[in-house]
Image (spheres, rainbow, N blue to C red):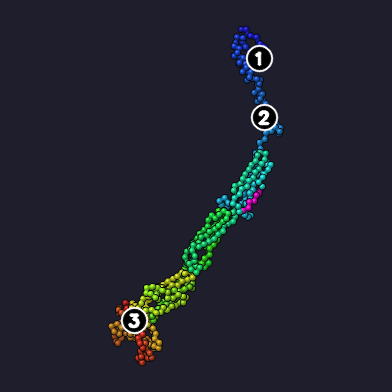
Amino acid sequence: MAHSQWRSGDRLGGGVVRENEVRPLVRRRERHFNRRTSRGPGWRLAALAAVSAMLLLPQTSSARLTLVDPPTVRYTIDGIAGTNGWYRGNTGGNYVVVHWTVTGDVTSTPGCEPAIQIPGPNPGTTKTCSATGPGGTTTITTKVIRIDATPPSIAAKASRGPDANGWYNHAVGIAFSGSDGMSGVAGCTAKTYAGPDSSRAVVPGTCTDRAGNAAGGSFALAYDSTPPQLKKLRAKHGNHAVIFKWQVSKDAQRIVVMRTPGKKKRGLGSTVYSGKASSFRDKGLHVGMRYRYTVSVFDAAANKVSRTVRMTGTGKLFAPAPGASVQRAPRLEWAAVRGATYYNVLLIRNGTIFSAWPKGTSLKLPRSWVYHGNRQRLHRGVYQWYVFPGFGSRAANRYGGMVGRSSFFFSG
């Protein structure tokens, strides 16, 4: 097969062109091929070789690519940590110290002093450090710093006033309160005092502020809940009177005797004695009337002890009381008569059954005796007795008017 000859218009690399092939299509392909390979054959390999050479060959310092980090900033707070985000100052005083630490290449550090003192009290403040270097700027702001190193003020108050003469005689509540102008009061204690007895009792308490500062306080009081003692209370009938005697403990301040009925109205009580004596005679009683006495002893704190005695009003014959019931042979007692040297005592039940002449103003009846030759003894029932004063010797047989008469019931 014959080949066509090369023409001067054909480009190198375009391939062999036959005359009988369609030329327009060939030309379009040639134009497209020439655009894609206009850089010349092997240009990709050359580019790869150049990059490899740059990476593998040593570079000068002016050509080296360097990455620099910005400065690092940190801080610490030198202070006593309290509560609720507060500081309670420093071991050296009422302040805290902010310490900044900056690392890396820096050109300026405004606000980044190594130690910045923040005085207290302080309701809240912050500090900012900015560090600038070749790699950029780092800015750090502290948390809010609150300082309160002062404890709150404290006061105490009782739930009521003293019960008597500055003394408390039963349990009393003591509440503590406080004030704080910076962090505010978080809470205070409250207590109840119920002893021991003391004229100088002290109740401690505390108040704490929100920063954790605590203040201690106290409340002093005189406390006595123990009543005095009433010992050996004795009540004895007298001539239209009752005679009281007693003993009390050293802390007793006042003895009060109440009587019902009182001095003015029947059924209503009244005070017949108030003082510090160890005895009292209540006079002007009515024969046969029943009285109720309440003897109370008070100490300085108004604690009291009381005892009740029931007595029947008597005249000149006062023991046993008129109409009293006795189980044993009683002792008869009567009022003395001026000038009398002896007395004649008569006991009557269905007639006179006993007669005696004692020299004193009392006589203990025997259980049995002989009267006018007849054996007598006390039997269950009511007895009446009479007393007459005698003057001079018994042989003179000189008697005065009757001292009195009374009765008793023997139940033995």
- Please tell me whether mark 2 or mark 1 is closer to you in this view: 1
Q: Three-letter amino acid code at disc 3?
A: Ser
Please state the horizontal and vertical placement of residue 405, each as a whole percent of the image: 34, 83
- The answer to whether residue 188 shows anywhere in this view is yes
Count residues near mark 3 (Cα–Cα under 10 Å), then give few for <14, some for 14-19, many for 20+: many
Magenta span: 114-120
Residue at left offset 62%, top offset 54%: 94
Can residue 173 be found in the magenta stretch?
no
* Mark 3–mark 1 distance (CA, rounded to whole Å): 176 Å
Tell me the CA gap for discs 3 and 2: 147 Å
Q: Nearer the viewer, mark 3 or mark 2?
A: 3
* Side (left or right) of 332 relative to 92: left
Tag shown at residue 406 = 3
Numbered disc 3: secondary structure: strand
Q: Would residue 198 be found to the left or right of residue 110 on screen? A: left
* Residue type (three-letter) at the residue carrying disc 2: Leu
In the rendered image, which quarter contains the N terminus?
A: top right
Q: Of residues 31 and 215, which is closer to you in this image?
A: 31
Badges 3 and 2: C-beta atoms under 8 Å apart? no
Q: Residue at x 44, y 78 (%)?
A: 279
- Most extreme residue toward the left is 350
- Name the residue carrying label 2: 55
Q: CA distance from mark 2 to mark 1?
A: 38 Å
